[in-house]
């Protein structure tokens, strides 16, 4: 049986990519989020995420290292931190080692310039790498899927060295 890895773009609009050891994209999922957080805000649903993670049979995960963003308020920062905590908790409960990868590191590995204005570059890179699955990255809102897949691939490259 081949090893399975997860690439995770955290947050309520994030995604989880499932890759094999060769970097082939096996499947991709949007982060399960429901409007059941404080004041009806979207929050990651831990049981749904756990179901997804356990079904993947992954042996390791690579997740974008996130922290408070400039200009972000306390409520937003707390929500983003909660998302990271849910992801780490689910991975820990599943016994899956998680390596955090800073955005500049995975973007450099993917050949993407830093900055929010380069979001479509992630989609273009993912489509070029997995052309038979281009439909997974077709919409502008699929950028988080593309980033999750590229984070996973960058983690695999990093682990191989």
Image (cartoon, helix red, strand yellow):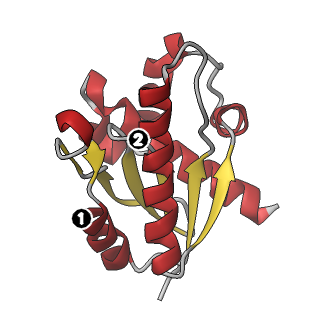
- Residue underneath mark 2: 11
* Labelled pair 1, 2 in contact (Cβ < 8 Å): no
Residue 148 x %, y %: 46, 45
Residue 35 x %, y %: 17, 41
Residue at image coords 53%, 74%: 92
Residue 51 x %, y %: 27, 73
Label 1 crowd (10 A; few <14 / some 14-19 / many >=20): few
Using the image, determine if residue 71 lies above or below residue 23: above
Residue 54 x %, y %: 35, 78
Using the image, determine if residue 29 lies above or below residue 117: below
Using the image, determine if residue 108 lies above or below residue 5: above
Residue at image coords 73%, 38%: 105
| Residue sitting nearer the eye, 94 or 75 | 75
Report, in whole angstroms, how far the alpha carbon at label 1 lies from the one at label 2. Answer: 14 Å
| Residue sitting nearer the eye, 84 or 129 | 84
Q: Is residue 152 left or right of residue 13?
A: right
Label 2 crowd (10 A; few <14 / some 14-19 / many >=20): many
Residue at image coords 39%, 36%: 144
- Residue underneath mark 1: 48
Residue 7 seen in the figure? yes
The C terminus: image quadrant: bottom right
**Callout 2 secondary element:** loop
| Residue sitting nearer the eye, 23 or 144 | 144
């Amino acid at each position: 049986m081949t090893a399975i890895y997860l690439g995770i773009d955290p947050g309520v609009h994030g995604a989880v990519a499932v890759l094999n050891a060769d970097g082939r994209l096996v499947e991709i999922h949007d982060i399960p989020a429901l409007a059941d957080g404080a004041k009806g805000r979207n929050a990651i649903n831990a049981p749904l995420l756990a179901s997804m993670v356990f079904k993947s049979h992954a042996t390791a995960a690579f997740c974008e290292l996130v922290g408070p963003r400039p200009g972000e308020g306390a409520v937003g920062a707390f929500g983003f931190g909660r998302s990271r905590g849910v992801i780490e908790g689910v991975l820990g409960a599943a016994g899956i080692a998680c390596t955090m990868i800073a955005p500049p590191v995975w973007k450099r590995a993917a050949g993407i310039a830093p900055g929010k204005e380069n979001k479509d570059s992630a989609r273009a890179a993912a489509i070029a790498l997995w052309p038979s699955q281009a439909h997974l990255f077709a919409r502008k809102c699929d950028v988080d899927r593309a980033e999750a897949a590229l984070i996973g691939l960058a983690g695999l490259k990093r682990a191989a060295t």
